[in-house]
Amino acid sequence: MRMPRFGIKAVMAGVVTVAITLGGWKFLERRRTLLARADYHAGHEAWLLEEVTPGAPGYLHHWPASLSQLARDPQYRREMLDYHARLKSLYQHAADRPWVVIGPEPPQPPMPIRPLNEASMTLD
């Protein structure tokens, strides 16, 4: 039986097909990863909006006293909401363009240091 002969054009077409398939697979994988990160930050944003809003159901019911005190700080709460909203937007945008390289995440806003006293240890 005679072996089939492949010309250079057929071999190049095969290499291109394999390269496009593998590249597309990597882009889909990267897109899934970026969408998962966007969902993570969207969940944190929604949780902060829900849990930290005074009067909302379950308001700070499972936070340690030190964190609940910090959660009542409107400036810190706003910074954390902005942080998660920015990262959610960044990852959603990057998921639409998985070939674009994104830089490192910005640092999380630092927790303000507040002295704790007996009155701040109780939940309202």
Image: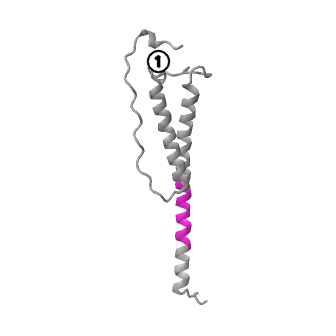
- Residue at screen point 42% across, 9% down: 118
Q: Main secondary structure of the magenta part?
A: helix
Whether residue 21 appears in magenta in the rendering, the answer is yes
The range drawn in magenta is: 17-30
**Percent of width and height locating residue 95:** 54, 53
Res 50 visible: yes
Q: Can you see residue 33? A: no
Does the stretch in magenta take in 106?
no
Task: Give residue 15's position: percent from left, percent from top.
Answer: 52, 75
**Callout 1: few (<14), some (14-19), or many (20+) C-alpha neighbours within 10 Å?**
some
Above or below, 38 against 72 in this view is below
- Above or below, 79 against 101 in this view is above
Q: Farthest bottom residue?
A: 2
Task: Please name the residue that numbered disc 1 is placed on.
Answer: 65
Which element type, helix, strand or loop, lies under badge 1?
A: helix
Q: Where is residue 39 shown, x and y percent of the image?
A: 56, 42
The color scheme shown is one colour
Q: Amino acid at mark 1?
A: Ala
Q: From the viewer's perspective, is residue 68 above or below residue 26? A: above
Q: Residue at x 56, y 51 (%)?
A: 32
Q: Quadrant of the C terminus?
A: top right
Residue found 54% across the figure and 21% down from its top: 60
Q: Quadrant of the N terminus?
A: bottom right
Give coordinates of residue 10: x percent, y percent: 56, 83
Residue 114 quadrant? top left
